[in-house]
Each structure stands twice: as C-alpha cells, then as structure tokens.
Amino acid sequence: MSRLGIDGPDAALALLGSVRDLARRHDAPLLEVQAHLQAGAIHVMCSNWIESLDELGHVEPHLDELVPRERCSALLNRGLASVSLGDLEHGRADLDRALDIAVEHGFVAQEYKARHNLGCVAWIAGDIPGALALMREAADMPLDITSARGLLDLGKVLLDAGLIDEAEDVLARGLDAARRDRQPLERGDVQLDLARSALLRGDVAQARVRAGHAVRTFRALHADGRTEEVELFGAAVDLGVGRSLTRASRVAAKWDTTTPVTPPERLATRIRAEVALAHNDRQAARVELERLRSDQPQPLGARLHEHLLASRLAAADGDADRATRILEEAAEQLALDQGGVHSMEIRAGLAFHAARIRDADVEAATDSGSLPALFESVERWRAASHRAPPLRPPEDEETAALVGRLRRLRRSADDTPLSSAQREVVLLQSEITERLRAARGERDEADVRAVAFEAAARAVAERDATLVTFHEVRGTVVRLVVDRSGTAAQSVLGPVRDVASASARLTSDMRAYAVARPSMAAFLARARESSLREVDGLLLRGVELSGTVVVVPTVGLASLPWRALPTLREHPVVAAPSATAWVRRPVTASADPTIGALWGPGLPRAREEVRAVAEAWGRHTGDGSGVRPRSTASTVQTGEAGAAVVAEGAAVTADVRSALATASVVHLAAHGHHVDQSPLFSSLDLADGPVFAHELRAPLAAELVVLSACDVGRSRGRPGDEPLGLAAALLGLGVQCVVAATNPVHDDVAAAAMVDLHRRLAVGVDVASALRLTAQAVPGAEAFCAYGSTWQTD
C-alpha cells in the first residue's frame, strides 16, 4: 500500500505480482492469497471492478482459512465490486456476511464500511430513504474513521435525491477530508461529483472547471480508468450543449461494450446513441438503445435520459404517438419515484433530474405549434409530486423528541444569529431534516398521470373558470389560457430575468407596505401599486377572463399576491400547483362539514376571532350558536356533523394535528413564519411552540384549511415547479383548499377578514368567490388567496 501511495496503482500491482510469483515458487499458498486480496483491494480503489472480482476469485477457495478480519475485508471488497457491476443480489449477500463478521468480532471500522456500503446498495436500488438511514447508522458509530469516502457516497445519494445545495456542502466537506487525510483518489472522485452537481444546476462552465480539477488529480496518480471516466463526463457536457460531436464519439468509443453495466459504460452508450441521432443514423441509435435494456435498477437521471433518447428515436422514425407515450411514461416514472419516499423535500428534489427531458419535451411541443400538445407537455412535468400518494411517514419517538426540543428553543430563543440557542436551532433542524429524509412508510397507490388537455378544458367549462398557466421555455415566460369554450391561447410575455425581477420587486414592496410606519405608508402604498401594475401588465396584459380564474404559476411566480393584481380583483382566484391537481380536486365539500377553530398566543384578537368563526357556522347548524367551548385540553375534538368546536385556551401542537385529522374545515389563527431557506420548517406559533410543516401527516380529514397568519402562503420552488412551504405541504397531504397570505397582515385586518370569509362560506359561497367579496369589504384582505382548488358546502 505504501507503493500505491508513492508510485500509483500500476507499481503497487506489479509488486504484488512479484509477491505471488515468489509465493508459488516457495509453496506459500496463503501468502499468494494475501497478494490477491491486496490486489483486489487496489482494483476496488481504482474502480476496476472486473479485475477486482478476478483477483478476489482466487481468494474464495481459501476464504475460511483467513483470519476473521481478512475474511471480512475480502467480503467487503467483493461485495462492493459486485454492486458496482450491477449484481446487487450477490453484492448485498457479501456485505451482509461482512457485517455479521464485523459485529461478531467487534471490528468497528469494518462494521462501519459494511453498513455504509449496504446504504450504497439501497441507493442503487432506488431506495433513497433506506440509503440515507443506513449511511446515518454508519456515521453515528463511535469511531474515528476518515470521512472522505463516506461523505462522497452521501453526496452521491443527495445528488440523486436532487438536494443539490446539501450535496455540495457534503462534497465540499469530503474534499477537505480527502486533502487533510491525503487521499488523492477520493479527492478526484469528489471533484468529479462536484462537477456533476454543477451540471445539475445548469452551470456548464463550473462543471468543466471542476472536471478539469478531477482530470489533473487522476492523471497525477496514473489512474487511467478514472481519467477516462472524467473525460467521458466532459464529453457528455459538451454533447448536452451541442458541442463537439466528434470528440464525444471518440471518448465514448473507449467504453464500447455489447452489454453495458457500469455507470460509465451506460453513459457512453447513451452518448453514442445521441451522436447517432444527431447524425440521423437511426439504426445505430436503435442498436445502442437496445443495449441499454436491463432489469437492473438505474438512477432516475439515467432512466430519464434513456427515455429522452428513445422518444427522439421514435420521433425520427415518424411515430409521434409513440414518442409522446415514451415521454408520458418518463413523467409517470418520476411521479412514482417521488411517491416512493415520504420526505416532501426529496419528492420535490427529484424533479431536478427531469430538467433536460422536460426542456426538450416543452421545446418540441412549442415548435409543433399545437397548443393542446404544449399544454400537455408542460403539465406532465409540473408538480409531479402532487400526483404522488399522500405522505405517510411513520411516527418516530427520537425524531419527535428532537422536534419537541426545537419547538421549545424556537419558542424562547432570541433572533441573534450567533446566540447559543440559535446555533442549537440550526443543528436541530439539520438533525431532524436528516431523519425525515430517511423516513420510510407505507406507499399508497395513486393515479400519477397528468391531465389531458381535453379533460382540463372540460373541467374549465363545467366549473365556469378560466385556466391561466405559466411556463418557461428557451429563457422566456409563456402564458397559456384555456377559456370556457375550450379554446387555448398562447402569449410570450418576456425574458425570465425581467419577469423575475419585477416579481421580486413586487414581493418586496408588498411586505414593506404591510409593516410600514404611518409616516411612510403613503409613499410605500404608491410603490406597491406601481409594482402591482407592472407585474399585472407583464403577466396578464391582453387576457380575457371570465368566471373563476385558476392560476398555475412557475417557481418564480408561486409567492405572488394573485388576489391583489388589478386584473384579478374582480374575479374569484385560485392558485394551483398544477392543472392536474386542480382538475382532480373536488369542488364541493362533504355533507354537513364539521369545524375546528383554533388560536395561538400573541395575537390580541385571536380568541375573539375563532369564536366569531365558530359562531358564523353555528348560526347555520340549528343549535343557535354551534360553539362548544372547552378548557385548555390537549386535543380538540369536533362535535356532531355541522357543529363547530373552539378551544378556550391557546392551542398546542396536538390540538392542530387532531383537528386536521377529524374536522372538515380547520381555522388556525396564529403568528406564521415562512422560512425560505428551510421551507419545511415554516410554522405557526402555538402555546407549546411552533408547529412545523414537516410534522403534518396523512390521512387528513380536513378539506379546507384557513390559515389566519402572515406569510404562510409563500413557497420556495424547485425545478418542475415543485413548491415547498406550509400551504404546499397541506396540499401535498391531500387538503382540497388552503387559504393563506403571502405577506404580513395586520391583526385587526386578519380578524375582520376571516370572520367575513367564514360567514360567506357558511351560507354556501365558494372559497374563491368569498375571498373576492371579503377583499372588497375589508381593505387589506387581498393578501389572502385560495390555493389548490376552491371549496364550498354541498
């Protein structure tokens, strides 16, 4: 191993070859086995998987003759090589045996490696929560072991989950560890994965820089196989931006094989297929794609790339229907993969891998000139996670304890960023996030297909609505409008950067006006109105609207105050994560809805507000008031159908969870907080501290949730227009409609608006129409909008 570090793998393998020859001449079989064992380990370090299995094959007959530590190491390396060649069954079996030996004999380092590598197996098999859980178990072991390789593998899993920010942080720490511990191979591997993360972000220049670092690292080590892998990655980058077909073809040819198994072999095969398609050589492309057929699980990004190439081949063959079916299958596979995890964050993150196929699909549909085809291409990639089954992660006592600690800290901590309490808040949020990502629960079936244009047009006509969707293509924002006649109209609105700038300015002006001192109110009101007119002109100029306006925004537009835009003030408005989500959500409520009204501390009028809300429904339930006061109990229970229940004291977390699980309509009056950097820690303040978005669990009985709070209608978007935030979390759990505000609202405005809203709802006005009337009656109430679908009593 010293020769490996000084002169590289070739010199080390040559030395071991001499040892084997010497062992044979002196009839020392165990020494020969030791040489094969070390050679196998070196090949594993260099990713020479076939050579590693060949060397370790010589060890197999003598496996039981080795001491336990050597036997454990042989099984670890053989398992890793098998897994890397796609043989998960044998690889998992070897790793399980290695784990048993390590546990039995107290080999802590080997136990760490076995658990960690079993996490890699779970990752390759598509079980991201399982991978994170196993890697976490390994990382929590009490040992002082170099962290570069572990951080590298964790970074790979996070990249596959689409959590790019977190992956880059982990990989940067892995790079530091590799430098500190003088592990040049790990350093090169981390640099390559940092290049991959840059490419996922769409930063081609940074991807090339990082790949260049990896090439220089591997060349210095004479690691030719690793160098060629980085060159292959560079060829893929060039091909993706339409450059250097000749170079891509030449590099991919080095990996030519009839049966591609390893990730580089499969990438090279995809590159050759793409080059063939670019040269209109359909037969060559068909041969390459046929080679990719495999029963072994593949990463989502690779599968989507293969679907894209197969769709392009079908289109080149003139089979447009088949090309579309392939794209539909790919989008459905994305939604199914999202449904296989129970972390809202990972569900949204997985959409990163669809960026290239989505853009190609939308661009092709745009060029076709068919607006129904364009609508369907946009829709099949939009908010796919909202088509997945509801989130059902299991309850976990350790996570619940951490959340309880975080709740207490958030309740009492000051806002000083460097205070000890705030530092602990950050650490606890990180710990809870890791646990949530590793949560596995039951997986329900769901219809993950996107809505067809005809079905959407039919819903628009039946519900007396106008559907207004926005999407981005080739750096521009485009609007599609579907009216009640089933007619679609397209408008190109302008560059994405201009729309984003105007939207950000409006968001800032809305917030500034909401918290303005009296001396600044007039000035900020003018700035607010100017920004509203600007955004209104950019997004809605020339549009003809009637009935309820259903807005489906892009990521950059998701937090706009839609109800406040001048063109929309005279219309009922609903903001939906996708047209599919809106079409599939019912409009009418279950018969005789039950009401849960709760309030949090710190709002002077909150108790009065929720009693008035309950009374608004009580006047229509036949008992005169419908209000059933309760002392401060741990759980709020709904009364009989049609009645309303309100807690006398400020609600605690258990009250909210109980109300959401039992009541049809839930009203929450509390201080709200949107955390843009960690949207699943957006919260409402309760008596025992904040209740967080990530705590909520399906199944929920709530059909309508009204959040009388600031900011919680905001969301942080992910690619694929996947929203994250408190309102988005409730919609993802199956709530039909959420009413929330996108900016601060004065307490007296919120109280008056909410009582007015519920009085209208109780007499049968739908939510979107009721909000329009409330905004006219209560100045400032336009901050509240309906999300998901509208709702009304039957």
Image (spheres, rainbow, N blue to C red):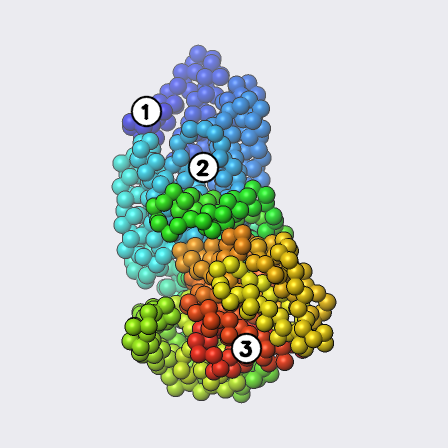
Q: In this orientation, does residue 291 appear?
A: no
- What amino acid is labelled 2 in the image? Trp
Snapshot quadrant of residue 102: top right
What's the mark number on residue 291?
A: none
Q: Could you tell me which residue is drawn at 47 percent across and 54 percent down?
A: 681
- SS class, disc 1: helix
Q: Is residue 430 left or right of residue 697?
A: left
Is residue 217 visible in the rendered structure shown here? Answer: yes
Q: Is residue 638 above or below residue 407?
A: below
Q: Looking at this view, is 195 or 305 the one in front?
A: 195
Please, which residue is most extreme toward the top here? 26
Identify the residue under disc 1: 3
Q: Nearer the viewer, residue 610 or 132?
A: 610
Q: Position of residue 757 (x, y in %)?
A: 55, 76
- Amino acid found under the numbered disc labelled 1: Arg
Count neighbours of disc 1 (C-alpha within 10 A) and say few if under 14, some if 14 to 19, many if 20 or more: some
Q: Which residue is mark 2?
A: 49
The CA span between labels 3 and 1 is 80 Å
Looking at the rendered structure, the kind of residue marked 3 is Asp
Residue at image x 42%, y 83%?
567
Q: Nearer the viewer, residue 354 or 522?
A: 522
Mark toward the start of the polypeptide (3 vs 2)? 2
Discs 1, 2 touching: Cβ within 8 Å: no
Instruction: Assign the C terminus to one quadrant of the image.
Output: bottom right
Q: Quadrant of the N terminus?
A: top left
Which label is found at residue 756?
3
Estimate the spatial distance between the alpha carbons at disc 1 and disc 2, rounded to whole Å: 21 Å
